[in-house]
Image: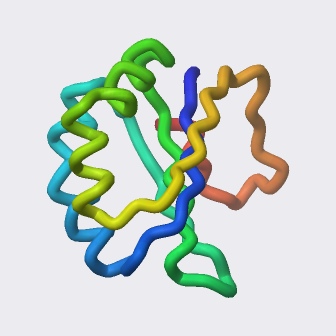
């Protein structure tokens, strides 16, 4: 599996989230399989978007597209950091935990 980890600060989480949600079809069509949005416990405007993609090439093409640069600007994203990752191992350590890795 290939993953993308994006860490960024946003001007206003609620405004960012509305735009993020409206882009769901774009993300799916570009190759995003599933995602998680995480929020810094101390700063609600520091957001992490962690997602699985059909390929890192598809993810890079999407995130570097002029259309997405405009969407990020409209969403108030400040200096996103993109980390492209290949999975080398996954596991569950607790038998009663529902694992997102089984999707």
Residue 69 screen position, x and y as percent? 30, 41
Along the horizontal axis of the image, is 60 left or right of 100?
left
Along the line of sight, the residue nearer the viewer: 73 or 82: 73
Along the horizontal axis of the image, is 79 left or right of 75?
right
Where residue 76 sits, quadrant-wise, is bottom left
The residue lying at 54 percent from left, 59 percent from top is 8
Where residue 65 sits, quadrant-wise, is top left
How many labels, in total? 0
The residue lying at 61 percent from left, 83 percent from top is 43
In the displayed structure, would residue 37 be above or below residue 59?
below
Coloring scheme of the render?
Answer: rainbow
Along the line of sight, the residue nearer the viewer: 1 or 65: 65
On-image quarter of the N terminus: top right
Along the line of sight, the residue nearer the viewer: 29 or 103: 29
In the displayed structure, would residue 72 be above or below residue 28?
below
Residue 77 screen position, x and y as percent? 41, 61
In the displayed structure, would residue 68 be above or below residue 11?
above
Residue placed farthest to the right in the image?
93
Residue 56 screen position, x and y as percent? 50, 18
Where residue 94 sits, quadrant-wise, is bottom right
The residue lying at 40 percent from left, 41 percent from top is 34
Along the horizontal axis of the image, is 55 left or right of 26?
right
């Amino acid at each position: 599996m290939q993953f993308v980890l994006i860490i960024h600060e946003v001007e206003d989480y609620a405004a960012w989230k509305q735009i993020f949600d409206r882009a769901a079809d774009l993300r799916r069509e570009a190759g995003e399989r599933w995602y998680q949005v995480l929020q810094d416990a101390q700063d609600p405007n520091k957001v992490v978007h962690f997602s699985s993609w059909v390929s890192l090439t598809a993810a890079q093409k999407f995130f570097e597209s002029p259309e997405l640069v405009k969407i990020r600007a409209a969403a108030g994203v400040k200096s996103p950091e993109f980390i492209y990752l290949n999975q080398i191992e996954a596991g569950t350590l607790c038998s009663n935990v529902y694992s997102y890795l089984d999707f």
